[in-house]
Amino acid sequence: MGSYGSGPFDNDGAFDFVGALVRKRTPSAGWKFLRDAVQQVEPFAGYGVEELVATGEIVSWVKGRGKHLPSEHPTFESWLKKQGKRVPAGFSAALDEKLKAVAKLGTSPAWRKNVLDIARRASGK
């Protein structure tokens, strides 16, 4: 049985996603993993939405604007420290576009608001 909530890490898919991310051995492997999540999301099919929202919050943390922390993954904080405050060029713009598209499809006002807040913090706007 799955666990769901409106936060970026309040579901099983996002929890597993963060677990897979922190197992990446190098920052470049981690960013490739995150970039793949952004590129592979299919918002209209519902595929990859949990991972996309989690990616938005992760980028917010890298930029020093994080709000929600995946506390069940204590290794996330050590992964985060390895990143510094560097986000690969072009990453935030692609992420912002996908997050806003996903937010439009949400049925819960609280969830939409949360996704738009994550998009704002991840893009720096």
Image: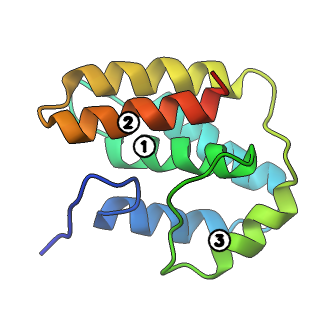
Label 1 SS: helix
Which quadrant of the figure has residue 5?
Answer: bottom left
Residue behind mark 1:
53
Amino acid type, callout 1: Val
Q: Is residue 67 above or below residue 125?
A: below
Q: Is residue 95 left or right of residue 5?
A: right
Q: Position of residue 31 (x, y in %)?
A: 72, 46
Q: Are marks 2 and 3 in contact (CB under 8 Å)?
A: no
* Mark toward the start of the polypeptide (3 vs 1): 1
* Mark toward the start of the polypeptide (2 vs 1): 1
Question: Label 1 neighbourhood size at 10 Å, few (<14), some (14-19), many (20+)?
Answer: many
Q: Position of residue 44 (x, y in %)?
A: 22, 23
Q: Residue at x 75, y 53 (%)?
A: 29
Amino acid type, callout 3: Phe
Residue behind mark 2:
115
Q: Position of residue 18 (x, y in %)?
A: 52, 64
Residue behind mark 3:
76
Q: Is residue 51 above or below residue 10?
A: above
Amino acid type, callout 2: Val
Q: Is residue 36 left or right of residue 99?
A: right
Pick the residue in front: 30 or 118. Answer: 118
Q: Are marks 2 and 1 in contact (CB under 8 Å)?
A: yes
